[in-house]
Image: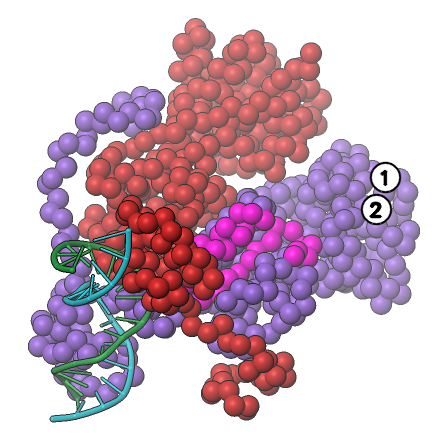
Chain colours: A red, B purple, C green, D cyan
Amino acid sequence: MSTSPSTADDGPSNARNAPHADASPKPARRATIRDVAAAAGVSTATVSKVFRGGYRLRPETEQRVRDAAEALNFSPNPYAQTLHGARTGTVGLITSDIEGRFSLPVMMGAEDAFGSDQVSVFLCDARGDAIREQHHLRSLLGRRVDGIIVVGSMTNPRETLGRDIPVPVVYAYAPSTHPDDVSVITDNVGAGRIAAEHLLSLGYSRIGYLSGDHTYLAARERVQGARSALQAAGTDILGGEALYGPWGEEWGRAGARRMTEMYPDMDALLCGSDHVARGALDALREDGVRVPEDLAVIGHDNWELLARQSRPPLSTIDNNLEALGRRAAELLNAAIDGSPQPGVHEVPALLVPRGSTLRAH
Amino acid sequence: MSTSPSTADDGPSNARNAPHADASPKPARRATIRDVAAAAGVSTATVSKVFRGGYRLRPETEQRVRDAAEALNFSPNPYAQTLHGARTGTVGLITSDIEGRFSLPVMMGAEDAFGSDQVSVFLCDARGDAIREQHHLRSLLGRRVDGIIVVGSMTNPRETLGRDIPVPVVYAYAPSTHPDDVSVITDNVGAGRIAAEHLLSLGYSRIGYLSGDHTYLAARERVQGARSALQAAGTDILGGEALYGPWGEEWGRAGARRMTEMYPDMDALLCGSDHVARGALDALREDGVRVPEDLAVIGHDNWELLARQSRPPLSTIDNNLEALGRRAAELLNAAIDGSPQPGVHEVPALLVPRGSTLRAH
DNA sequence: ATGAAAGCGCTAACAC
DNA sequence: GTGTTAGCGCTTTCAT
């Protein structure tokens, strides 16, 4: 159109385009180390030294360089830097968690641990698909990430991404089945224990367990932890075993009714998840059972949308995903620095007491 | 598993460590274009041509190069490539959405639109903090991203990130207040209309509106859309205006009761969000109002955890965030290619009918 | 159709 | 302290 070079593009005749073309001084080429050197009257090496730090320079020189850089709005091109074999300062985060309820907190923790000015995170969503996962793996390696974190969407162990990957990999939330891999998970057994101990400490003693899907390791481990805490206190889960069923409110409602029937003297109910607990709360309320006066209820996951708004607000156990992300980042850093720590690392869960266990006094 | 006790974490003294330590042969240096050239008996220029494509080479030569590359597990170093002024093939996604319920779907859409082998996404979480946002902005620019997408956590317009940013920026979900910026949002007015039309099409005619926080533009727009649809059908929202209140189930319960009292002949209830709708459903059920036989209910957001598990499952309007992400990516691409399309672009919402409006027949 | 060579922006010896 | 000078891995004229 105008004098401007081939805007070959499909540009559907946007009138706003043309006038703008040469009006605004094209931000020009970004300043390079050489421009700064020239402006400051020093060599490129000196500029480099200023920015890399750890060199002894005359303060005055350094200031001149910084001023020049500032004026030119210069920042070193990281791609040129990494050409010298240094790290790229990037890591990949492969998630399979469409909802983002696990990945995002983990990512935030990792961001913290890395220091967001040191390391940037490429996020890819594999959507639970192994093919896509491999695809993203390749693409991340192509981008020369320094390491990779793989976030699962459930706690069951998963297959390793591959053992011949040229950069360290850390599995978060869902551990790898391969013993030489590095994994970080929430301590689910501990989480179960915390829940049970919370109830015990409040004086509840006839405690039932309404769990979730038995094929979920997390479900079984939480039960196991609770049981061990109860046994340590000289008691046990009512009936000696938890009731398992499909995750979800529906099961929570049905299960809660079954349990109150089976154990009329039950005074507290452990639930395998907040979903189940929410179902239980709703059913109990409908049946005229007062919570926590007649029956205390506690869940797992601290799924806030559910837990905060239930009646009463639901006590629960938080999976501490941010801490998990931080730990994953630390372990990844360690591995990148040459000291991998294979095995499954556990991060403790957190008690979040609310009205469903705490009696107003 | 069974034997594994609490591993209180932090245990650096992991016996599993040592044996693996020096067993693994350092993966050596990655192959470079020169290695491939040597192996294939051609020049580096030829290898480069093979990989960049668009050059005429003897098929046989090309094959030799590809084989050599394959054998050496070579892939071109993108950092070296971008040194030549090309794009980096990276974009930044700045979110302020801790929960990730908006960002992740948007990201997936963007991933799709870009083509995950063309473009990788740096995700940063600003946690709703303008300082952190600027910080991430700098860091992304330092990494030479080709463009940036900013995802808001609520639909209210937000301030521009800055008008002098050297790469294109697209605002998603929350539009920028600056008219020259490029924004993509869900069509909230349309969403309200769709909800109302759905009810009308099912024969409901005495329709109330229980909204959310009046300071939310989305809340008001949805009401506006619904009203216009009703008026087009010759009726209006019961009482001529929606009832506003704090987002959440509690308000849903209280508001629903208020509305049924005010309008005993109401046959359908539009709700400003799924949270509000869920509260309404719970209260109605407690009060013996059958849904949808006595009163139909519909929400907004398709917040599946809530909507799927309510009694009955909640009809709602999906914000179509993946499409929004895709559109954002397209607009960003266009801008990167030199044809920015300033203004606010709208993506239509989607009806998700479920049991709370659909009478079993 | 292929190769030689000059960079891209920066770093790391090694001189001065 | 600061400058010179080779590269890092790749692309791109320009010859051949």
Which residue is under mark 1?
Answer: B258
Camera sees residue A94: no
Magenta range is B130-159
Which residue is under mark 2?
Answer: B243
Q: Position of residue A242 (x, y in %)?
A: 46, 23
Quarter of the figure with the N terminus of chain B = top left
Q: Residues within 10 Å of mark 1 (few under 14, many from 20)?
A: few
Residue at the image point whose x is 34% and y is 46% from the top:
A149
Q: Is B202 situated above or below A328?
A: below
Quarter of the figure with the C terminus of chain B = bottom right
Q: Is A103 situated above or below A227?
A: below
Residue at the image point whose x is 46% and y is 43% from the top:
A108
Q: Is A211 situated above or below A64?
A: above
Magenta stretch holds residue B138: yes
Q: CA distance from mark 1 to mark 2?
A: 9 Å
Name the secondary structure under disc 2: loop
Q: Earlier in the sequence, mark 1 or mark 2?
A: 2
Residue at the image point whose x is 36% and y is 73% from the top:
B85
- In the image, B140: left or right of A91? right
Residue toward you, B166 or B176: B166
- In the image, B188: left or right of A67? right
The lab-note entry on whether marks 1 and 2 share a chain reads: yes
Q: What is the chain letter for disc 2?
A: B
Q: Is B296 situated above or below A258?
A: below
Contact between labelled residues 2 and 1, with CB atoms less than 8 Å apart: yes
Camera sees residue A13: yes
